Amino acid sequence: MSKEFKQNPKKKYTVKDEFINLAHGSGGKAMHELIEGLFLDYLQSPLLKALEDQAVFELSGKTGTSRLAFTTDSYVVSPIIFPGGDIGKLAVAGTVNDLAMSGAKPLYLSVGFILEEGFPIKDLKQILASMRDTATEAGVEIVTGDTKVVQRGGVDKIFINTSGIGIINHNLKLSASRACVGDKVILSGTMGDHGTTILIARGELELESEIQSDVAPLWSLVEKILECSSEIHVMRDPTRGGVATTLNEIACSSNVCIQIKEALLPIREEVKGACEILGLDPLYIGNEGKLIAIVGANQAELLVRQMQQHPLGSQACIIGEVIESPQGMVVMKTAFGGTRIVDMLVGEQLPRIC
């Protein structure tokens, strides 16, 4: 393998663009250039520099030390209501999931609304009901918030920001930098469901489909995973940029190679068909209710069986393994027996899916 591909050494990103473009929010290379080549130059915090989906830190008090996770995210999805969910469900589930990927039990959320003048109250009621119901499902409380209204045209209908805090009640340290050679790569279900749903729901394409977004809060599945295995090294949810970009982030952070097998990748036939028509690769299309877990090989099969007993992990499967080289890269064994590089998303594939 190391003779076939050159290593992908860690590099310092720089921003060469003079203006922000949509690719800077895609989750791919342009966004990494923006974050690592600009934001980290100005916002120099060790916790931020780790580039996890949340910050994990300790707080000491009279009763002892607690390990907490804190995260924030903003949601600008278009359309705001789509098959399987809406922007409110997405906002709560997405923030709960970012906490859960560190192994933290989500506790409290904040929510900030930016509303466009003229936004229908009936749509706001639906979104608020979704947020309430999803928070109840996830076992979290929405405890503080803020509302702003801007003039018509100042924002596209509604944008939502959510922040969350959770507590870590175990000794595991989950991080994208902890993937080890020999580990197995587990995906909790089918790829690309959310991004494909959003693309079709925009009505820009004359496609009819019963595909629904997989948006869901994953803490109950994560809790089961933590109970079953002590050899979990990494958990990530493959949102913007999809499975391919998420695995590239892990490979670069851990300085390993991740090898996946095309024949093992779970994809719904409807998603596969839509992607073939549109010329898209499901590996780069985001989910909002799936997770990637990288775990010790000796516990992987057992963990998959346990995950399959949970409704959110019924299609869990091993899709690959961690190998030594070429470091910092993702490669795929194709159905034809060859091997190809699976690079991080370049440019903008599906704007505003979350």
Image (cartoon, grey):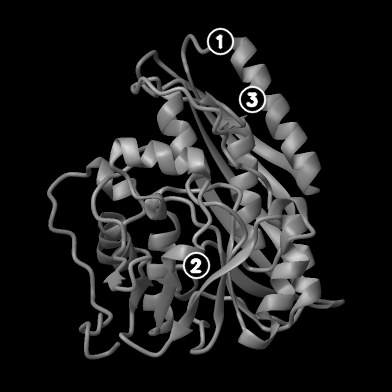
Query: Which x, y percent locates residue 275?
Result: 37, 41
Q: Tell me if residue 57 comes above or below residue 346 in the rendering.
A: below
User: Circle 1 — which element?
Assistant: loop
- Count neighbours of disc 3 (C-alpha within 10 A) and say few if under 14, some if 14 to 19, many if 20 or more: many
- Count neighbours of disc 1 (C-alpha within 10 A) and say few if under 14, some if 14 to 19, many if 20 or more: few
Sequence-wise, the earlier of marks 2 and 3 is 2
Query: Which x, y percent locates residue 221?
Result: 74, 59
Question: Which one is in front, 4 or 150?
Answer: 4
Q: CA distance from mark 2 to mark 1?
A: 36 Å
The residue sitting at 24% across, 84% down in the picture is 7
Q: Tell me if residue 68 comes above or below residue 115 in the rendering.
A: below
Return the residue at label 3.
127
Query: Which x, y percent locates residue 163?
Result: 60, 49
The residue sitting at 34% across, 88% down in the picture is 325
Sequence-wise, the earlier of marks 2 and 1 is 2
Q: Quadrant of the N terminus?
A: bottom left
User: Does the rendering let one see residue 142?
Assistant: yes
Return the residue at label 1.
120
